[in-house]
Structure formats: structure tokens, C-alpha cells
Amino acid sequence: MNANPWLTARRRGGVGGLMMLAVCGLIGSGMRPATAALLSYEPFDYTVGSNVLGQTGGGGWVGAWRAHAGGAVPAGSFVTGTGSLVGPAGLPTQGNHAIVSGEFGTTQPARDYAEVAGAAGSRLYYSYIGQRLGTPVVAANEYPRGANAGLFDTTHPTRPERVGVGNSSNAATNVWSIIPEGSGNNRVGSTEPFSNLAWQVLRIDFVGDSSTPDNAYLFINPDPAVEPDISAAAAQSIGAFDFTNTDFLRAFVGNTSGSSPYAVLIMDEIRLGTDYAAMSSTQVVPEPAFGLAIAGLGVAGLVYRRLRSKASD
């Protein structure tokens, strides 16, 4: 018969053993704030010229930057650039920025975060400052090779990528776009050139569970202090795709393909949050339940110290 770990901890270590078990449980649970505003933040505050792969900066992430399981990050393809990229007035920035290049092969860096289930009636906001760079071609779309950053569901049975922002390979026009399920066939373009430095904010309104399509609205350079109305969206995807249960972010920057030169995407100030105000925050806020649990452990620790003190008198 399996022993009860709480009873075992109590017998072996008293209150101290229980405290340690509780701490381990909280850390290992990967608790995701249910009511917090800013969930994850990446300002790329790393040494200029250093590789971003393996870095653990920012807040609210689960682990370091890694190569996407279905791709790679060739050496020199994901590095730290000098200074923060410039967003709209009032948008706080920190650190430096990332340069993601397809020069040495298609590059797909990823970073995990605790799952956002997307309960009906809730929202997820996702933003970053970005710009498409590289060698242009003479065509309706001067940058035909894809570059974007999307949100994924690890466990999705058919299409893990739920939604991305940037542009797809062989898109008809060079514009900032919503890319549901990572497919160019689903792309919804704005009128803002992708080669313009811009702060994009994607608002996702969850309608139901994974069987119910959700709504997404893309805003380009909105006022950070005033949440835009959906009527101001530069592009939107309404009732066509499911965006629930995402748990990691992945950038895609394509290599040279035929007559299409490799892509370069610079990006900065990645944020995920539950409200628009979080898109201007730099402080990841812990879940209230987590904070209360930590406070409870603090009280338990104080009681434990007093009991030990009395025992030694």
C-alpha cells in the first residue's frame, strides 16, 4: 500500500517536513495565474551578441528558450540585438531585442508557458514589437518567405499551432497578418506593411471549449493607455478556428527557398496576459491563490520556529 506523503512528512520532519512538501508541490504544479494580468514577459535583457537559445530571462515562462521539437535553431540564427525596439508612446520597454534569421536554415525557437485553457468568456492578449527585414524581391510581396510568431497547443491531435502573427510564406501581400493554425490558407491580412516596425496586439475572445471556434482581433500600434474597440482591429478572425489550450510560443523564420531569400524577423517585448493593461506591464503578477499559499507557508514557518524555540527552553 502506498504511504500518504503528508503523513510521512509529518512523522519525519514535523511542520518543517510538511512545509517542504508543500513548497515542492507548489513549485512542481506549474500553477498558472487564473486572475493575474501579465502572465509571461520577455524583454530580451541579455548581453548584446549572445545567443538567446538557452536563456531564461523575463518572467512567467516554464523553462528556457529551446528549439521547437519539429524544427531547429542553427548557430547564429537567434541572437541578441542592441537596445529595445521602439513602440508607441507610453509603451515601456526594457533590455535589448532578438534577431531571428533564416540565413543558416529555417529557424524555430520556442518557449513554454503554463497552459492557457481559455474558458468561455475569458480573453488572452498577446503582443510583441516586430519588423520583417531581409533582402526584398521585385514582386507584389517583396518578402515572400514566411516569418511569424505563434501560440501552440502541445497536445493538439492535428494542428498544434493555434494562431500566429506575422506573415506566411508566399503570401500575396507583405502585411502584418493573423495566421490561424499556422496556415497561409487561413491568413487574414491587415493593410500595415510587415516591413514597418510595429507593436502588434492580438486579442483572443474565448467562446467555448476546444470544439467551439473563437474570435481574434489584431491591433497595430494602438494607444497603450486606452484599450481599442474591436471596430478598430486591423484584421480579425471570427468564429472560424479554436485558439484554446496554448502552452508555448514559437517563432518561425524561413530559410532561402528557390527565388525567395531567407527571412529576418526582429522582435521584442513579448507579452501574454489576461487584459489589455497587461500589454503595458513589465511585472508578472503571481496568482492570488499562489500568494496566499506562500503566505500560509510563512505563517506555518513562524509557528514551527516558535514551537522549536519552546521545545529548546
Image (cartoon, rainbow, N blue to C red):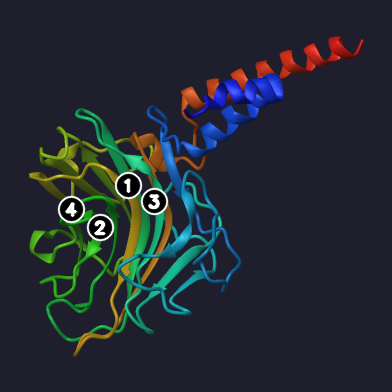
Q: Nearer the viewer, mark 2 or mark 4?
A: 4
Q: Is residue 269 above or below residue 242?
A: below
Sequence-earlier tag: 3 or 4: 3
Q: Secondary structure at mark 3?
A: loop
Q: Which residue is mark 2?
A: 165
Identify which residue is drawn at 92% across, 10% down: 313
Viewer-proximal residue among 233 and 245: 245
Sequence-earlier tag: 3 or 2: 3
C-alpha distance separating marks 1 and 2 = 9 Å
Q: Position of residue 157 (x, y in %)?
A: 18, 53
Q: Which residue is mark 3?
A: 88
Q: Which residue is mark 4?
A: 157
Alpha-carbon neighbours of circle 4 within 10 Å: few (<14), some, or many (≥20)? Answer: few
Sequence-earlier tag: 1 or 2: 1
Identify which residue is drawn at 32% across, 47% down: 126
Q: Say what amino acid the circle numbered 1 marks.
A: Tyr
C-alpha distance separating marks 1 and 4 = 23 Å
Q: Say what amino acid the circle numbered 3 marks.
A: Pro
